[in-house]
Image (tube, rainbow, N blue to C red):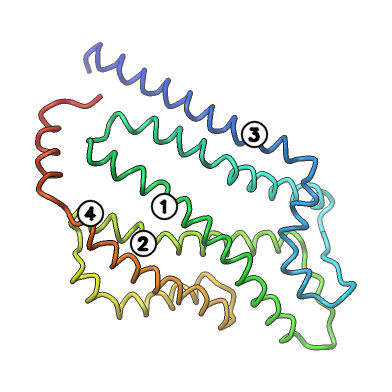
Amino acid sequence: MSESSQETFVAHLIELRDRLLRAVGAVLLVFFCLMPWAGQIYDMLALPMMQSLPEGTRMIATGVVTPFFVPVKVTLMVAFVCALPVVLYQTWAFIAPGLYAHEKRLAVPLVVASTLLFLAGMAFCYFFVFKMVFAFINEFAPKSITPAPDIEQYLSFVMTLFMAFGLTFEVPVAVVLLAKFGVVNQAKLKEARPYVIVGAFVIAAVVTPPDVISQFMLAVPMWLLYELGIVCARFVAPSSGDAAADAAGSEVPRS
């Protein structure tokens, strides 16, 4: 490796470090600002469960430090979501110099769309799925027992569903990327529809609790979002202009 290449590599590492520090700093700044309301933030997260429990029932904490650490974890998660625009900007600022012009035009809409879709998936889970799933579980439970969910297990449960629904709502982005880079076309996407529907229900059965409601509410949006991806794929097919830009760009080394 030449001396100039080593200097370039070190410069990239320094820039990466600086971008990471700025992103982490933004998350920590929001986190410390939200910490005085950590208890209220957890109460908001627990609201769907509390509304489904019998009146007067409260959640429990079996660990000594659990009542402190669980709200802190929830607050850190909320801080990351609030600071997500800064994190995404730092990521974009680092990778943008190495992209072709047409890749830059595609990257910004994809980053914005993927962020909004992930947040939409979390919102759908919180406002619709939790309410129906917890009500179903409470009604199904024998009348001889009093449910008292542990807050740590509840956090693990909701985080799993948040991730499942957030990633599910990214299906259109994945389909658009596959179509843009010529891996599939609209005809192949339509041919794969039956397999996608079956796969959606299989994935939903694996990642959701063992109840029909949550599985159905994950599988159906996954299928509908795949259909949305098929529609969007019509407008992002690879063009000859992109290929020409790639060929021209390959002649000039990118930093």
In the rendering, at what x and y percent does residue 82 appear? 60, 43
- Name the residue type under label 1: Ala
Residue at point 36%, 47% (across, down): 109
* Secondary element type, mark 3: helix
Q: Nearer the viewer, mark 3 or mark 2?
A: 2
- Name the residue type under label 2: Pro
| Residue that sits furthest to the top in the current view | 3
Picture layout, residue 125 above or below residue 52:
above
Q: CA distance from mark 1 to mark 4?
A: 15 Å
Residue at which label 4 appears: 180
Relative to 201, 60 lies left or right = right
In the rendering, at what x and y percent does residue 57 appear? 87, 72
Q: Give the mark nearest the N terminus, 2 or 4.
A: 2
Q: Nearer the viewer, mark 1 or mark 4?
A: 1
Residue at point 60%, 72% (across, down): 129
The answer to which of 85 and 197 lies nearer the viewer is 85
Q: Quadrant of residue 170?
A: bottom left
* Secondary element type, mark 2: helix
Residue at point 66%, 44% (across, down): 76
Q: CA distance from mark 3 to mark 2?
A: 31 Å
Query: Residue 172: which disc?
Result: 2
- Name the residue type under label 3: Leu
Q: Quadrant of the N terminus?
A: top left
- Name the residue type under label 4: Lys
Query: Residue 28: which disc?
Result: 3
Relative to 77, 219 lies left or right = left
Q: Give the mark nearest the N terminus, 3 or 1.
A: 3
Check whether the beta carbons of the residues at disc 1 and disc 2 lie within 8 A of each other: yes
